[in-house]
Amino acid sequence: MQTHYDAELKDTVRYLGKTLGETIKNQLGQEWLDRIENIRIGGRASYQGDAKYSEELKETFKSMSDSDLLTVGRAFAQFLNLGNIAEQEYNAAMNVDASIDALFKHLDKAELSTEKVQQAVGKLNIDLVLTAHPTEVTRRTLIHKHKELANCLQAVHQESLSDVERNKVETRIADLISQAWHTEEIRSVRPTPVDEARWGFSVIENSLWEAVPDFLRELDDRLNQDYAVSLPLDASPVQFSSWMGGDRDGNPFVTSKVTEQVLLLARKRAAKLFATDLDRLQVELSMYDCNDALREKVGDANEPYRALLRPLVQRFIATRDGIADYLAGNSPDTSQWIESDDELIDALMLCHQSLIDCGMQVVANGLLLDTIRRARVFGIHLLRLDVRQDSERHSDVFSELTRYLGLGDYSQWSEADKQAFLLRELGSKRPLFPAQWDASDDVKEVLDTCKVIAKHSKHGFGIYIISMASEPSDVLAVQLLLQESGVDWPMPVAPLFETLDDLNNSPDVMRKLLSIDWYRGYVKGRQFVMIGYSDSAKDAGALAAGWAQYQSQEALVAIAEEYDVSLTLFHGRGGTIGRGGLPAHAAIYSQPPGSLEGGFRVTEQGETIRYKFGMPKLAKRSLGIYASAIIEAMLFPPPAPKEEWRELISAMAAKGRDNYRATVRHDEEFVPYFRVATPEQELGKLPLGSRPAKRKPQGGIESLRAIPWIFAWAQTRLVLPSWLGVMRAIDSVKNEENEKVVNEMFSEWPFYRSRLSMLDMVFHKADPRISEAYDARLVPEELKHFGEALRAELKESIASLLAITGEEGIMKNDPQGKESMEIRAGYLQPLHYLQIELLDRIRKAGDDAQNTDLERAMMVTIAGIAIGMRNTG
């Protein structure tokens, strides 16, 4: 049965596809358009299970030249892009307020007191951390065209449009699609960290700048209407941080100079945006009535609000132009730069109070209120830059220093000796680093980064994250480095626990850390801890990682309570299931009870930023989902797991870990199979993000980043890291004795239910037939059995999941999500068969395939499949 969603969206996809077809016909002729249309029809039939059409696609591609394969790849990648744009626009237009509506329905049913709602809203603290490293496969120039296209679709769907207006919009749509077709879709070079940061700033400027005050206004209105509760004027329940330009873990291109440039570029963009806002405000606030406080500030000016705001506009312009001048290598006058959020907020609040006092509440709560909200959320730094570095790099600084000072090698010391040395130096008044010390380049880079932090305002920074943290000394070392570099404020330092062992050891590490008197004094009652999802899942499989993350968070919450510390857990989730991705509501509601009390901090990664926040209406919807889920989880916390649930999930997790590692780590045929059955080696050539695909260029699977690891399996539709070993582990404990407990876990425990819900989504994206086609062409005979065994487990796992959920088929509970994937399926299918043909040709050609149509076509199919699957890593 076709739903309204399905029908309307399909109409839009057909319309865009037809327009692209016209563009292709105009450039290449009717014969080419007929050819592509036949491939599309064959792809749809192949997806629906017609093996004859699958064989026809293979034969068609075998007979094509390299350049023709490139043309077909480009056409289907563009079709998928257009399908995604249509879906984004549809989702933005429909149910934009559904998340907030759902929250208030839930609150109303519970008959909560005003006081309880006020408390929950007061604790609302969402920190969304924009990161680039999962890589956005689409070029920024195309993203701009896609955004314009989405705006046109919004316009063309308005029933009130006249024929003349409709024709004008449709002409613009054709224009944009033609522009995109004639634009290179693959970057010629990798983006730099500064490029990535600029892209993050553009998301704020083009979407979040409008969406945030709109969202807060609607939340405030509903709270007022239903509970007589107001968002305070100083509230910033949502805020934004960034890793772009600050995350140096394994990225040699993020240097201290890059970090400083990104900090200044963020301030420059904020200055530009606030100058525009304030200029508009001073034009509108032409009133002469004001209160005494404002009058005292501006004297006898006839237009007091303008008199206050005009100089502020000029200072923001001076900041914007001065930073541009500084970055160009000049020495501008900085005396007129805006230096603190208070300079902006104090002026805005003075205007607001004056308008209220003079009976102009409507004016006070119009554009002025929106600007106040932006000032609270974004501030003069636009967002706060996190710094991330590997613990080994900090240890290297002290090893080199202690050898220079004749104290031995710090890295060889015991943990107790390291702590004693660090605490002694933290309490010392004399400098630790000798003036004449000629440190190595790597050590200088770590120290220069700390000096950049010291040089700039604390309001421009978020937190300092230490990856591969395993001991209290890892945290103390960073605090000593910051202190010695002149950082005179307590920058929060967060250990990142990412492997299975790290997660399991994290409570012990944090207990030791919080038992140090000096440290408790330093953190002043606030501790951040980052939980890694990607590497733990890559290390131990999805189920073991998920349970370890849950237990770790649960224990950390208890330790924080014991030491009277407010704990903010920072979730390093990716967009995909194998990297911890989950729909926001399910992800938040499946957290341990109490884990949201210190706020909710989460990475928003790569392409998911565009899908969630790329348009104002989408951004507003996403913010509503986060806010409603967090408020709901605080007011109606999920149950703590019963002891029998713990026993069973622990048994499942251990079995899942062993199942996963038996294949990925211990089977000597796994790596050879992975290398040939997926485009893993070809992925390294795609100029995606600024980071290398591997931490160590010569390393094997263990050194491969979680992103390409997931990406490679998604390309072949086996999506192996997200499900391998999980259902077999669950089945292993499902016997008559445990059946009642397992059923109870599914019906009553959001954490367990969310694991199965994730698998439901994964299995819908998986397609054993596509994986089999890759194997048939690319895998040598002696390894084919390996893929057959994996697909057998996949099919068995799907059947097992359906037996537990009682559903007739996958994604029955999410018809919209199912239809969304199926709308794209007919365009995805040909790209897979095309990629198989290309992989075969490239591997046979060896070095001769470099920089040819063949390699370019390969890049186009990789990007196209990622677009169709709606994720990279």
Image (cartoon, rainbow, N blue to C red):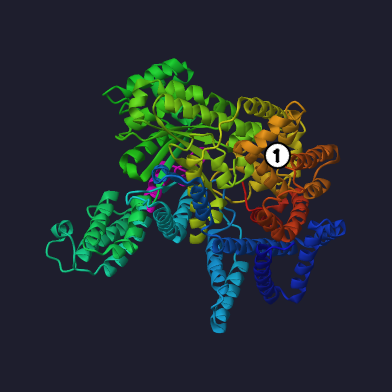
Residue 727 vertical position relative to residue 867 in the rendered view, above or below: above
- In percent of width and height, residue 278 lies at 30, 62
The answer to whether 97 is drawn above or below residue 596 in the figure is: below
Which residue lies under the disc numbered 1? 723
Q: Taking 575 as reference, is 204 left or right?
A: left
Quadrant assignment, res 324: bottom left
Q: Residue at the location (33% across, 50% down)?
A: 232
> Magenta segment, which residues?
242-266
**Residue 203 x, y percent position in the rendering:** 47, 56
Magenta segment: does it hold 678? no
Left or right of 239 on screen, residue 190: right
Is residue 184 in sight in this rendering?
A: no
Q: Please indicate whether residue 157 sits to the left or right of residue 235 in the image.
A: right
Rendered image quadrant of residue 154:
bottom right
**SS assignment at label 1:** loop
Residue 210 location (% of width, % of height): 43, 60
- The reply to whether residue 707 is in sight is yes
